[in-house]
Amino acid sequence: MTDAPRPVRTRPRWPWIVGALALLVILVVVFALTAPRGGDDRAVPATTAPTPTEISTDAPGAAVSGCIGGRERDAAMLVAAQKAAPHTENGAASFAAAFVRWLYQYPTPPASDVQAVAQRIYSADADPKKVIDFLAGSPNLSGGLVPDSQPFYVSTVPGVYYIESAAPNKVSVSVGGGLVTDGALSATLRESITVTAQWEHGAWHVVESKGTRTTQDLFAIGTAFSGGC
């Protein structure tokens, strides 16, 4: 038996080499899967959502009312119509119809109603004094269709409307109606007026009203109101 020292046994190195190569392959695969594709590695900016228009879209089946605010033709009716009319094209048209029913009548509305309407219904872009002074003269707004001093008013029962233009917060709409004299709706007498309404402080307000279309033209292209009074 010899006292020579025994040789130290070492583990083979090939398993380490194989493991290192396997790890290297894994890293290469991971890098290939996660690396950005394409030649431009700059961050792509997020798409900016389009700014919605300020005026809402009318719901499917929504109609323009010719009797919004009630059947009366006083300032209280018009204020109620203003509160009820939604921020849509149809809402503006319904409000315009109520305004026409209030304005086009003889005798003209009393001074207290005119003051209330000038303050609450007209736009900040309008001149309320002009409205007050104009109606103070008791004009015949029928344009001669009804003799001076003969009572009359406008009914939207046979009425129509036509949207002339619509932009965010501002709508121009022509309103046509029939004249009522001696308590009876005329079969032939019709009126036509274009009202421009502006959305201010959460409600529609009148900017101006003026004649732009003949009754024949308007009633040929207009759409009938959903209910009238």
Image (cartoon, rainbow, N blue to C red):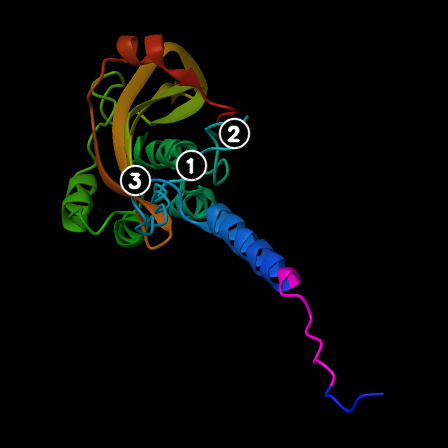
Q: Amino acid at mark 2?
A: Ala
Mark 2 neighbour density, 10 Å: few (under 14) some (14–19) many (20 or more): few
Cα–Cα gap, marks 2 and 3: 19 Å
Residue at left offset 41%, top offset 21%: 182
Which residue does the image show at 25% across and 50% down from the upper left?
118
Mark toward the start of the polypeptide (1 vs 2): 2
Quarter of the image for residue 224 reads top left
| Depth check, front residue: 113 or 99 | 99
Q: Residue 202 in the image: x percent, y percent?
A: 38, 52
Image mark for residue 62: 2
Residue type pointed to by label 3: Pro
Disc 3 marks which residue?
Answer: 168
Q: Which mark is residue 91?
A: 1
Q: Specify which label sits upstream in the sequence, 1 or 3.
A: 1
Along the line of sight, the residue nearer the viewer: 87 or 150: 87
In the rendered image of this protein, does residue 134 appear above or below residue 160?
A: below
Q: Which residues are magenta?
A: 6-15
| Closer to viewer: mark 1 or mark 3 | 3
The residue mark sitting in front, 2 or 3, is 3
The location of residue 50, given as percent across then percent down, is: 35, 42
Decide: is 204 above or below 1: above
Task: Name the spot of residue 34 as percent of width and height, x first.
Answer: 48, 50
Residue 83 screen position, x and y as percent:
44, 48
Q: Is residue 1 above or below residue 95?
A: below
Between the C-alphas of marks 1 and 3, the distance is 13 Å
Q: Quadrant of the N terminus?
A: bottom right
